[in-house]
Image (spheres, helix red, strand yellow):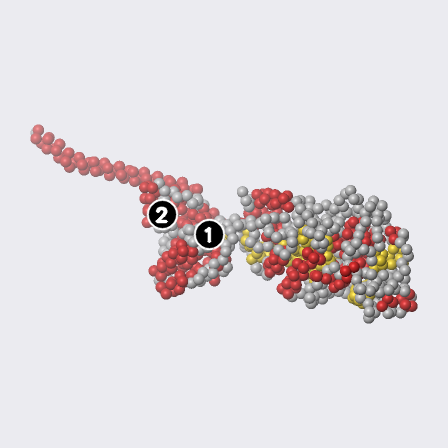
Amino acid sequence: MKGEKEGFIRKFRTGGCLGGLAALVGILLLTAFAVLSVGGALYVWGVSKTLPTAEEMVNHRPSLATVVYDRNGKVLTNLYYENRQWVKLDRISPIMVKAVLAAEDADFYAHRGIDPVSILRAFIKDLTHQATRQGGSTITQQLARNLFLTKERTLSRKAREAILALRMEKTFTKDQILEMYLNTIYFGHGTYGIGSAAQAYFGKNPGQLNLSEASILAGLIAAPEYYTPLRHLDRAKTRQAYVLGQMVAKGWIGREEAQKALDAKLPLKSVRRSSVTFSDAPYFVSYILFSQLLPKYGSDAVYRGGMRIYTTLDADLQKDAEAAIQKLPSEGAILALDPETGEILAMVGGKDFEKSKFNRAVQAFRQPGSAFKPFVYAAALEAGYRPVDHLMDSPLEFPNGWKPENYDLKSHGEVSLIEALTYSYNIPAVKLAHLTGLEKVVQMVRNLGITTPHLPNDLSLALGSASLTPMEMAIAYSCIENGGKRVVPYGIREVRDNGDTVLEKNGPMISDGISPKVAVMIRSMLQEVVRSGTGRGAAVPGYETFGKTGTTNDWSDAWFCGGIPGLVVIVYAGNDDHRPLGDRMTGGRVASPVWKAFVSKAASRLKLAKSFAVPANAGIEIVRVCRHTGFLAASGCPAVSILLPAGEAPQAVCPLHGGAVAAARNDSLAPRLLLSPMDEALPSASGISAAGTPAEERPAEAPAASPVPTPVLKVPAPQPPKPPSPAEKPYRRDPSTPNDVEKRYQELLKQYGLTS
C-alpha cells in the first residue's frame, strides 16, 4: 500500500501535476484573452463614439484658399489658412495619380483601408519604445489622420486612425477617397492639395503635370520640408528616384522613361507661403479685403471657404504702376480708373507694402495745389462765364496780409481764362473764385464727387488748399473725362463661393455730376494745358490728353491728374512727414514724367480710342481762337481749338493779329473782361495784353496791345472776399498718420484671426 501511494505521488509530480498546471494556465490565458477581447471591444466601442460618424465625414469641408483674380482671369493672390484648391480626380494627370500611389500606397485599390501588418509592427514598437515610429499607413489612414486626428505618435492615435479608415472605406468609394487625399495632403511651403502644389512649384494645373514633375511632388508627401526641391534638390532627386523605381517595379512605366524623367530639368517656381502678405497688388488686395470682403463675409468664409473674387484690376497695368512709382523721389501713389465705369484698373499706395501699409491712394489727405483749379473754372463756366472771357492778373493783397502770387512772382495783365488755366496763374484763380462765389465752387466740387470734409471756407480754396485723397481726385477727373457723369470707384466685379454660386455682382454706379457742356469745356481747356502749358511734359503721343499739374507752395506735394480717352490716372508724390520734396520740385517736374510713362504703356495695353467723344447733348461747338484775346484766330495768332457753348463764340477775327478792328468793336459776343470789386482800384483796361505766358516762355518781342478795348463786365461778388487767416492752417492733413494706419492694420489682422 505504501509503495502504491509513493508511486502515485511520483507520478503526480512528474506528469499529472504538470498537466494540471498546463490546464490551469490555459484557463487563465483563455480568461485573459476573453477579458482583453471584451476590453478591446469596449475600447473600440468607446473610441468609435468619439470619432466622426459617416454623416459627419460626408459633410466635412476642408479649408480651401480663396483666389483673387484680375479682370482678365489672372491670379493676383490666394487668401488662406491652408493654401488649397480643390481639383476633381479626373482633372488630375493620371501619371500624377500613379506617382502618388507608387510613393505612398501601391495596393490602395486592393486593401480595405488598413494594413494589418503595419498596424502590428506599430503595436510592437509602441510596446518596446513607448512611441510609434513606423510609417506604412495606407492612403485611407493618412486621410483619416489629416482630416480628423492629431499628429501625435501613440498607439491610441493609431487605433483611432484604423477605425476611421475602416469607416471611410464603407462610406466612400476608392476614387472619392483618393480625390480627398490628393486635395488635402500637405506638399510643403504652405501648399495643401495637388492643385495648389502644382501651381506653387511649377505654375501648372494638375492635369498638365509630366512624369518628372509628378514624381517630385509625390516624393514630397513623406516629408515635405525635408525633400523640398527648393532647398534640398539633392534629397528631392533621391526621393524622386525612389518613386520612379516603385513605378517601374509595378510596371506602370519603363526604365528608360524613368531615367528620362529623372534627368529632366525641373522648371521650379519660387513659392510664397504667407497668407497675409499678398503676392501681387498688395495695396489693392488689402483695400478690397479690409474695406469689403472681411466685413461682409468674415474671415472664415474668405480664408477657408474657397471663394473666387473677380476684380476690376488689370494685372499688367498694375505691374507697370508698381514699376513707375519707384521713379518718384519720395513716397506716393498711382491710381488708374476707367472713367466710364469707375472700375479700378491699377492702385499703388506706396513703394513697399512690407515697409508701410499706409495706402496713399485712399488714405493720404493732401493739398492738390493747382490740380484743384479746374474745379474753380468749372464752377465759373457753370455760372455763365466763357473760356474766352478775361480776368486781370494784377497784384493782390488783402488787409490781413495774405498776398497770393504767381509761380514766376510776376503779373501778366489782362489774360483769358484759357490762358490763366493753361499757365496756372494763381491770382486769376483767386479772383475767379471770388466772382463765382465760394459756395458755387464748393457745390461744383461736391457735384464732381469729392466728399472730403476738409474744404477751407476762404479764397485759398482756389489754390488747392483743400485736403483730399488721390481717389477723390480720380473721381473728379473721371467726371470731367466722361462728359459729366459721376462714378463710384469699385474693385470687385463678382464674388462666387466654392460651389460656384454668385454671392455678389457689381457694376458701374453712375449718377449725374455736372452738365455735359461744362465737362467738355473744362476738358477742352485742360487739353490746352497739356498742349502748351504747365502739363506739356505729360502729352501722350497719338492721343488727346488732358490734365493739370499740382504743387503746394512749400514743395511738399506734387501731382499730375488727367487722362486720355477711356482712362484717368492720378500720380501723387510726397513725403509722409510732409518734408519738402526740394526747391522747385513741381508737379510738372516730379509727377508728369511718371504719369506720361505709365499712361503711354496703358494706352498701348488697353487699345484705347485716340480722341475724346463729345456727348450729343453737350450743346457746344469747336472754335479756333487766339489764346491771348479770345477772338477767332488769325494766321498770326497763338491759336487754340476750344469748345464753347453753341452760338456764344466771338464772331470777329482777332484784331491783335490782323483782324478787322471795326468788326471786333461791334462783336456782341466779344470776350468780356470780368472785373470784381477787388479790381476797382485798378486803372481801366486799355487793351488786351500779349504778355500772357510765363517769363521763361514769352516771345522775345511781345505784340503791341490791341486797339480794341475789351468790354468790361463788372461782376458784383456774391460775398466779400475772405482770405485765409495766417494764424490758422486752412486745411487738415491725414486724419490718421502712417503709424496709426500700421497699428490699425495689425489690429485688423488680430480681429479677423489672421495672426496671433
How far across and down, in percent of the image, does residue 476 sit?
A: 73, 55
Quarter placement of the N terminus = top left
Task: Please give the label number shown on residue 188.
Answer: 1
Please, is residue 143 above or below residue 481 in the view?
above
Residue 586 occupies which quadrant of the picture?
Answer: bottom right
Name the residue rendered at 59%, 44% in the picture. 746
Residue 109 visible somewhere in the drawing: no
Q: In this view, does 691 lie to the left or right of 328?
A: right
How far across and down, in percent of the image, does residue 242 sit?
A: 37, 57
Residue 176 occupies which quadrant of the picture?
Answer: bottom left
- Disc 2 designates what residue? 134
Please, is residue 360 above or below residue 544 in the view?
above
Name the residue rendered at 71%, 57% in the picture. 588
Q: What is the three-letter code of the residue carrying label 2? A: Gln
Quarter placement of the C terminus = top right
Residue at the farthest bottom position:
635
Task: Please give the label number shown on residue 216.
Answer: none
Q: Which of 86 and 528 is in front in this view?
A: 528
How far across and down, in percent of the image, does residue 393 sit?
A: 83, 56
Q: What is the three-letter code of the residue carrying label 1? A: Gly
Residue 575 visible somewhere in the drawing: yes
The nearer-to-camera label among 1 and 2 is: 1
How far across and down, in percent of the image, does residue 438 sit?
A: 81, 50
Q: Which of 189 and 17 is in front in this view?
A: 189
Name the residue rendered at 80%, 51% in the picture. 404
Counting residues from the start of the chain, the first of labels 1 and 2 encountered is 2
How dense is the environment of label 2, judged by Cα within 10 Å: few (below 14), some, or many (20 and up)? some
Helix, strand or loop at label 2? It is: loop
Name the residue rendered at 52%, 53% in the picture. 272
Q: How many marks?
A: 2
